[in-house]
Image: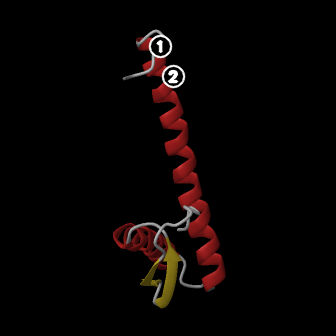
Amino acid sequence: MDNNQEGAKVNRVKVVIHGVEYTVRGTSPEERIQEVAKMVDRTMNEIAATAAYMDERRIAVLAALNLADELYELRKEYQELLALLEDQTGGRKAP
């Protein structure tokens, strides 16, 4: 959650992920940290609901893989949209 902005205020936020409370430090706004934690919590809970036999570490790794896959797809889509925009504007940058 820390993007290393020099001089930026460091927030300490308590979050609950899959039933465990964590204190997260980062320069992102508290609301963003809470939303990201909710995404992780939701993903872990969805995985745990489908595989009750799985230990916490496996659930966490699968959640990380699912979220990384989602990020990968969104980045790919973003690059495709940028390329389409460049094609439509003749390579000109938007003002």
Mark 2 — residue? 83
Q: In the image, is residue 81 above or below residue 68?
A: above
Mark 1 — residue? 87
| Cα gap from disc 2 to disc 1, whole angstroms | 6 Å
Q: Are marks 2 and 1 in contact (CB under 8 Å)?
A: yes
Residue drawn 56% across and 60% down? 66
Residue drawn 52% across and 78% down? 25
**How many numbered dots are placed on residues in this image?**
2
State the residue in front, 11 or 13: 11
Q: Which mark is residue 22?
A: none
Residue drawn 49% across and 67% down? 8
Q: Quadrant of residue 33?
A: bottom left
Q: Position of residue 72 (x, y in %)?
A: 57, 47
Identified by mark 2, the residue type is Ala
Residue reaching furthest to the front: 7
Number of other residues with Cα within 10 Å of mark 2, as a class: few under 14, some 14 to 19, many 20 or more: few
Identified by mark 1, the residue type is Asp
Q: Position of residue 52 (x, y in %)?
A: 53, 84
Q: Quadrant of the C terminus?
A: top left
Number of other residues with Cα within 10 Å of mark 1, as a class: few under 14, some 14 to 19, many 20 or more: few
Q: Position of residue 13 (x, y in %)?
A: 43, 82
Q: Quadrant of residue 11?
A: bottom left
Q: Position of residue 51 (x, y in %)?
A: 54, 77
Q: Is residue 37 left or right of residue 52?
A: left
SS of the residue under disc 1 = helix
State the residue in front, 90 or 20: 90
